[in-house]
Image (cartoon, rainbow, N blue to C red):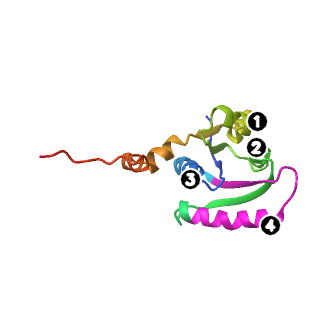
C-alpha cells in the first residue's frame, strides 16, 4: 500500500497554485501528512538573493491568505530552474506526492514557454497531482461576470 506522509505543493503565488494548495491540504488531512510549500525563483542560471528575499515575503502573505492557522506548512524558497528545483526538493526531503497547478496554456504559448508541470511530471520520482485551472475559473468567474465583460445587458422580461 502506498503511503503519503509528505506532500510538496508548488506555488507561483497565483490563484491557480492557491487551488493546488487547497487540494494538497485536503489530501494531507486525509493521510495526516506533512505539507511542504515550495516557490522557486527562476534565475535562469544566475543567483539573486534579493529576489529570494522578496519571494519569502510574498510567501508569508500567500500562506496567510490561503491557509487556516490550524494548518502547519513547512515553507521553502529556492532559486534555479523551477522543474529541476522541484524534483530536487522532493528527492532531498522524502516527498511522497507533488501537487502542482497547471496554467492551462495550449498551442503556441505552450510550445514556446513549455510547461513546468509537464517537466515535473516527466522527471519526478514520485507521483504528481496536477490541478487544472478550470476548477479556479469555475469558482471565480460567474455568468454575470462574462455578460458584464461582454457589455451584454440582461433585461427582465415584461410582465
Per the image, is 56 magenta?
yes
User: Quadrant location of the N terminus?
Assistant: top right
Report the residue marked by disc 1.
Answer: 123
**Where is residue 20 drawn, in percent x and y?**
57, 48
Side of 104 where 144 appears, left or right = left
N-terminal of the pair, mark 4 or mark 3, is 3
What is the C-alpha distance between the residues marked 1 and 2?
Answer: 8 Å
N-terminal of the pair, mark 3 or mark 1, is 3
What is the C-alpha distance between the residues marked 4 and 3?
Answer: 24 Å
Q: Is residue 76 above or below residue 110?
A: below
Q: Which residues are magenta?
A: 35-64
Closer to the eye: label 4 or 2: 4
Residue at image location 71% in from the left, 41% down from the top: 116
N-terminal of the pair, mark 2 or mark 3, is 3
Per the image, is 53 magenta?
yes
User: Which type of secondary structure does the marked residue at label 4 adopt?
Assistant: helix
Please tell me which residue lies in front, 114 or 152. Answer: 152
Residue 9, label in figure: none
* Cβ atoms under marks 4 and 3 closer than 8 Å: no
**Mark 1 crowdedness (10 Å alpha carbons): few <14, some 14-19, many ≥20:** few
User: Which type of secondary structure does the marked residue at label 3 adopt?
Assistant: helix
N-terminal of the pair, mark 4 or mark 1, is 4
Side of 143 where 42 appears, left or right = right
Residue 83, label in figure: 2
**Mark 3 crowdedness (10 Å alpha carbons): few <14, some 14-19, many ≥20:** some
Report the residue marked by disc 4.
Answer: 50
Report the residue marked by disc 3.
Answer: 15
The reply to whether residue 10 is in sight is: yes
Q: Residue 73: name its quadrant.
A: bottom right
Amino acid at each position: 500500500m502506498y503511503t503519503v506522509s509528505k506532500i510538496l505543493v508548488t506555488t507561483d503565488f497565483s490563484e491557480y497554485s492557491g487551488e493546488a494548495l487547497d487540494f494538497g491540504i485536503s489530501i494531507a488531512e486525509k493521510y495526516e501528512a506533512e505539507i511542504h510549500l515550495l516557490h522557486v525563483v527562476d534565475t535562469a542560471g544566475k543567483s539573486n538573493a534579493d529576489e529570494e528575499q522578496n519571494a519569502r515575503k510574498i510567501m508569508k502573505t500567500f500562506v496567510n491568505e490561503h491557509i487556516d492557522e490550524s494548518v502547519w506548512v513547512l515553507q521553502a524558497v529556492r532559486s534555479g530552474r523551477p522543474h529541476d528545483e522541484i524534483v530536487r526538493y522532493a528527492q532531498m526531503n522524502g516527498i511522497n506526492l507533488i501537487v502542482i497547478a497547471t496554467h492551462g496554456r495550449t498551442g503556441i504559448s505552450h510550445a514556446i514557454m513549455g510547461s513546468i508541470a509537464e517537466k515535473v511530471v516527466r522527471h519526478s520520482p514520485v507521483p504528481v497531482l496536477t490541478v487544472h485551472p478550470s476548477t479556479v475559473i469555475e469558482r471565480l468567474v460567474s455568468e454575470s461576470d462574462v455578460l458584464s465583460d461582454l457589455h451584454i445587458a440582461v433585461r427582465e422580461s415584461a410582465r
